[in-house]
Structures are given as C-alpha cells and as structure tokens.
Image: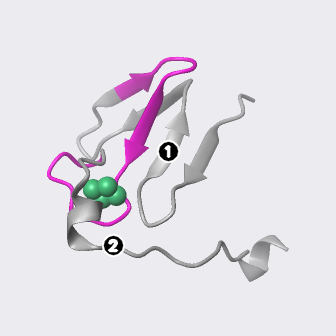
Amino acid sequence: MTKVEITVMKDGPYKLVGPVSIEDHEGNEITVREGKTVALCRCGGSTRKPFCDGTHSKIGFEGAKAAVERASEK
Ligand code: FES
C-alpha cells in the first residue's frame, strides 16, 4: 500500500502530495504524480472544485481548531 500524505492547512485547503489518484463525481480520474502537490478545497467556495482557487482567503474561512479522532477509530 502506498502512503498518501494529506495536510490540513490552517483555515485553508487540504494539501495532497502525490502519487495519488483523484476521481471526480463523473468518474474522471486526475493523476497526481509523485512529488507533485495539489490543494483540495475545504471551504466549499472554490470555482475550480475539487481544487482550491484561493477563495478561502477572500471569504475568511475558518477551519476547525484541531483534528479530532473519531470514536470508532480509537
Ligand atoms: S479551501 Fe481554498 S478555495 Fe476553498
């Protein structure tokens, strides 16, 4: 299994470092090559979903303070 790195950016997007494959709602596959970085929208405001377009800064998006483990995963 390949390890996928996902970083939650403070008040911003999810940053993914390839290699990773992203499939959109129509089944289209986007391949992110090894070492390449993409940012996925977390605020819901991007016009380029699933990718971040910087809108989070303009709308003052505030993410959760910290990650919380789900009770079922403890
Ligand atoms: S997180 Fe950047 S536009 Fe939504």
x then y, percent, for residue 33? 49, 17
x then y, percent, for residue 25? 27, 47
Q: Please indicate whether residue 61 sits to the left or right of residue 69 in the image.
A: left
Q: Please indicate whether residue 27 sits to the left or right of residue 19 in the image.
A: left
Q: Nearer the viewer, mark 1 or mark 2?
A: 2
Name the residue that disc number 2 marks.
Answer: 61
SS label for mark 1: strand
Q: Is mark 2 within 8 Å of ligand 1?
A: yes
Quadrant where the C terminus is found in the figure: bottom right
Q: Is residue 13 magenta?
A: no
Residue at point 65%, 36% (across, down):
4
C-alpha distance separating marks 1 and 2:
16 Å
Q: Are marks 1 and 2 in contact (CB under 8 Å)?
A: no
Q: Is residue 39 magenta?
A: yes
User: As shown in the figure, which amino acid type bears the numbered disc 1?
Assistant: Lys
Q: Please indicate whether residue 35 sits to the left or right of residue 74 in the image.
A: left
Which circle marks residue 45 in the picture?
A: none
**Neighbours of disc 2 within 10 Å: few (<14), some (14-19), many (20+):** some
Residue at point 49%, 22% (across, down):
36
Q: Quadrant of residue 60?
A: bottom left
Q: Which span of residues is magenta-colored?
A: 30-50
Quadrant where the N terminus is found in the figure: top right
x then y, percent, for residue 18? 55, 26
Name the residue that disc number 1 marks.
Answer: 15
Residue at point 40%, 43% (across, down):
39
On screen, residue 22 above or below 44: above
On screen, residue 13 above or below 35: below
User: As shown in the figure, which amino acid type bears the numbered disc 2?
Assistant: Phe
Residue at point 50%, 44% (across, down):
15
**Neighbours of disc 1 within 10 Å: few (<14), some (14-19), many (20+):** some
* Mark 1 / mark 2, whichever is N-terminal: 1
Q: Please indicate whether residue 51 sits to the left or right of residue 47 in the image.
A: right
